[in-house]
């Protein structure tokens, strides 16, 4: 839900036996829903403009939406559309180990050359 749209009307309606939450900017949305075959249309005119999640929170507290069906529909919507928080997983502790000093390759060759000088032929 990465949108900044706001709505001044929200509610629920039943279509094909399933309840869903509805959002609009005009209470006359009832006519469009009714023509489309929606039943049990309940829209509330909110006092201002709100995002979908804010409007759903407001509906939970309204008397017209106090029945179990409306509460379940609104709560389900809020759970499905709540902002997802990324949980930080603890990373394994990394031990700081001092790197070993490497001897230059030329120095190693020079040492081997000296050792070979003392060896009998």
Image (spheres, rainbow, N blue to C red):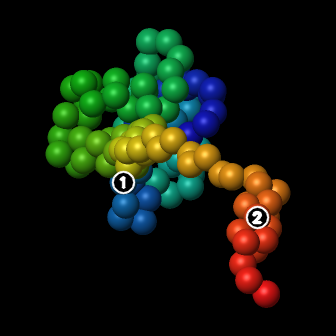
- Helix, strand or loop under label 1: strand
Q: Position of residue 83 (x, y in %)?
A: 45, 37
- Judged left or right of residue 72, residue 29 is right
In the orientation shown, which residue stands out farthest toward the top? 47
**Is residue 2 depicted above or below 18 in this figure?**
above
Callout count = 2
- Judged left or right of residue 45, residue 115 is right
Instruction: Locate the C terminus and report the quarter of the image it occupies.
Output: bottom right
Q: Position of residue 57 (x, y in %)?
A: 34, 28
**Is residue 18 depicted above or below 40 in this figure?**
below
Between 119 and 59, the one nearer to me in the picture: 119
Q: Residue at x 53, y 17 (%)?
A: 49
Res 84 label: none
- Helix, strand or loop under label 2: helix
Q: Is residue 88 visible?
A: yes
Q: Residue at x 34, y 24 (%)?
A: 58
Q: Is residue 39 visible?
A: no
Q: Residue at x 41, y 44 (%)?
A: 95
User: How crowded is the residue under tag 2: few (<14 C-alpha within 10 Å), some, or many (20+)?
Assistant: few
Which residue has dot 1 on it?
Answer: 19
In the orientation shown, which residue stands out farthest toward the front? 120
Q: Position of residue 15 (x, y in %)?
A: 43, 59
Instruction: Locate the N terminus and report the quarter of the image it occupies.
Output: top right
**Is residue 6 depicted above or below 67 in this figure?**
above
Real-space Cα separation, disc 2 to disc 1, in angstroms: 91 Å
Q: Position of residue 43 (x, y in %)?
A: 41, 33
Q: Residue at x 44, y 19 (%)?
A: 46
- Judged left or right of residue 22, residue 110 is right
């Amino acid at each position: 839900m990465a949108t900044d749209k706001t709505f001044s009307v929200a509610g629920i309606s039943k279509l094909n036996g399933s309840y869903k939450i509805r959002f609009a900017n005009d209470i006359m949305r009832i006519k469009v829903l009714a023509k489309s075959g929606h039943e049990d249309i309940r829209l509330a005119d909110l006092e201002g403009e709100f995002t979908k999640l804010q409007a759903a929170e407001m509906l939970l507290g309204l008397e017209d939406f106090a029945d179990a069906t409306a509460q379940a529909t609104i709560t389900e919507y809020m759970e499905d559309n709540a902002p997802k928080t990324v949980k930080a997983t603890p990373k394994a502790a990394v031990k700081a180990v001092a790197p070993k000093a490497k001897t230059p390759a030329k120095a190693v060759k020079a040492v081997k050359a000296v050792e070979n000088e003392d060896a009998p032929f």
